[in-house]
Each structure stands twice: as C-alpha cells, then as structure tokens.
Image (spheres, rainbow, N blue to C red):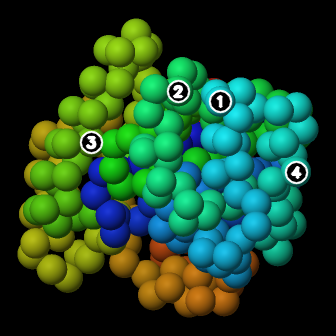
Amino acid sequence: MRIWAVANQKGGVGKTTSVVTLGGLLAERGKRVLVADLDPHGSLTSWFGYDPDTIAHSVFDLFQHEGKVPDGLPAQLITDTGCPGMSLLPASTALATLERRMVGVEGMGLIISRALAQLWDDFDYVLLDNTPSLGVLMVNALAATQHLVIPVQTEFLAIKGLERMLHTLQMVMRSQKNQLAYTIVPTLFDRRTQASVKSLNMLRKTYPDTLWRFAIPVDTKFRDASQSGQVPSALDAETHGVRAYRRLLDDLLEQTGGAGER
C-alpha cells in the first residue's frame, strides 16, 4: 500500500479535486484505491453523493475508542464511489468536534495510521483529503502518509498560505523526528492572467527543488464532474485538466517508486 496525503492550510486550492482525479486515474490503471475524507466540511464525501451532515458512519467512528481502532472497524466504514476500483472512507461534520473531545486522550495522532494498517492488503493506494487547518486530523494525515502533495493556487494569497503549510510541516517533522517527502503542485493556473503567470514564476523561483515542473490549469470540467458525482476522467478523459493530472500522476509514481505502474 502507498499512502499519499493532499494537504494545505488554505482552502480552495484544489485538494479534493486532486484526490478525486488522481484516485480515478489510479483506478483506471487497475489499482485498488481508497480515498479518505479527513475534512469536517466533507467535500470529498459530498462529491460522491453522500451527506456529511447525516451520514451514519464515517471517519469520526475511528476516533471514538480511546486511541484504539477495533478490529474490522475501518472496513465497515468504507463505501462505494461509483468509480470501479475506487472506494471511499467518508467524513461527517462531527469531525469538527474532535479537538474538544480528544483533549488529554493519548495516541490520537496515530488513529488513521492504525486504521490503514488493518486495510494494508486491501488497497494499493490510499489518498487522504485533508482539512485546511492544523489539528488532530492533519497530524493524523502527516503521520500516516508516505508522500505529501501540497496543491497551491497560482495567486499571491495562496502562496502566503503555502509558507504557513511548510512551516507546519517542519514543526510536525521535528516532533515526529521524521522527514517527509513532498511535492508542491501549482493549481488553478490561468495563463491568460498576469497574476497567475507571475505567481507561477514566483513559485518556481522560491521552491525550485520541490515544485512540480508543470501546473494544473483552470478547467470547468472539474466542476461538472463534482456536480455529476463522477471522477473527472470518466466525464472527459482528454480535457486539459485531466491531461495535466495524468502527467502529475506519472511524476508522482516516479518519485515514490511506482514508475513501473504507469
């Protein structure tokens, strides 16, 4: 199993779109994929037609056992996405209460790691969609992941948010005494606007070693896919946004030792 987390402390940068699109492309290549929603807003859950306000069982259930994960529970929470080869571990809005509920409970930062350990032989790839804030959910994701993908919108305020995300990452790595590889992915790029072009050039100058060499363009097909509950490649396999994510996936596979899986 390979585990990738998609995270940024700024919202609206394309985290959920990245998880759904990359997950769908992996599934198309015959991989068994689990996408997990670790965001109380539940955008990933909503994408596939589930209501995070009313869903009966979710990631929240994993955090109700004093830092332990009962045998078999993670598998019971998994549901269908409608995309062959891809399953969903959904979120509920109750996740927003975790910080208050978990005060003083030991081991809460390793719940997702423990849950995925039970699913190790069931999936080839797990993609974690994260909340845009530092807390127990993001700590869980960073502890569980093997590679971090950081989408950043090509505009000035998003780049400032990237600085905060990288500062958080450094803090977590120091506390866990673990170095985590990451890839910064420029998103929502619009070559027609000077602001977008300037922002991309700034990213390339500031983060030459960790920035993906291309960018994910603005593409209305992503919105259409979310409204129809499909992965973008199922709606239109050759739209320019999907082609960019396909290129990103190839590069991530090469970085993480899966180059032979293209």
Type of the residue with mark 1: Glu
Nearer to the camera, 246 or 69: 69
Tell me the SS state at disc 3.
helix
Mark 4 / mark 3, whichever is N-terminal: 4
Mark 1 / mark 4, whichever is N-terminal: 1
Q: Residues within 10 Å of mark 4 (few under 14, many from 20)?
A: few
Judge left or right: residue 258 versus residue 118.
Answer: left
In the image, residue 172 above or below residue 258: above
Distance from the alpha carbon under mark 2 to that under mark 3? 25 Å
**Marker disc for residue 105:** 2
Quarter placement of the N terminus: top right
**Residue assigned mark 3:** 165
Judge left or right: residue 66 versus residue 252.
Answer: right
Distance from the alpha carbon under mark 1 to that under mark 3? 29 Å
Q: Are marks 2 and 1 in contact (CB under 8 Å)?
A: yes
Q: Position of residue 247 (x, y in %)?
A: 53, 55
**Residue 237 location, quadrant:** bottom right
Q: Position of residue 100 (x, y in %)?
A: 42, 45
Q: Residues within 10 Å of mark 2 (few under 14, many from 20)?
A: few
Type of the residue with mark 2: Val
Q: Residues within 10 Å of mark 3 (few under 14, many from 20)?
A: many
**Residue assigned mark 4:** 76
Q: Are marks 2 and 4 in contact (CB under 8 Å)?
A: no
**Residue assigned mark 1:** 66
Q: Position of residue 70 (x, y in %)?
A: 82, 32
**Residue 146 location, quadrant:** top right
Q: Residues within 10 Å of mark 1 (few under 14, many from 20)?
A: few
Tell me the SS state at disc 2.
loop
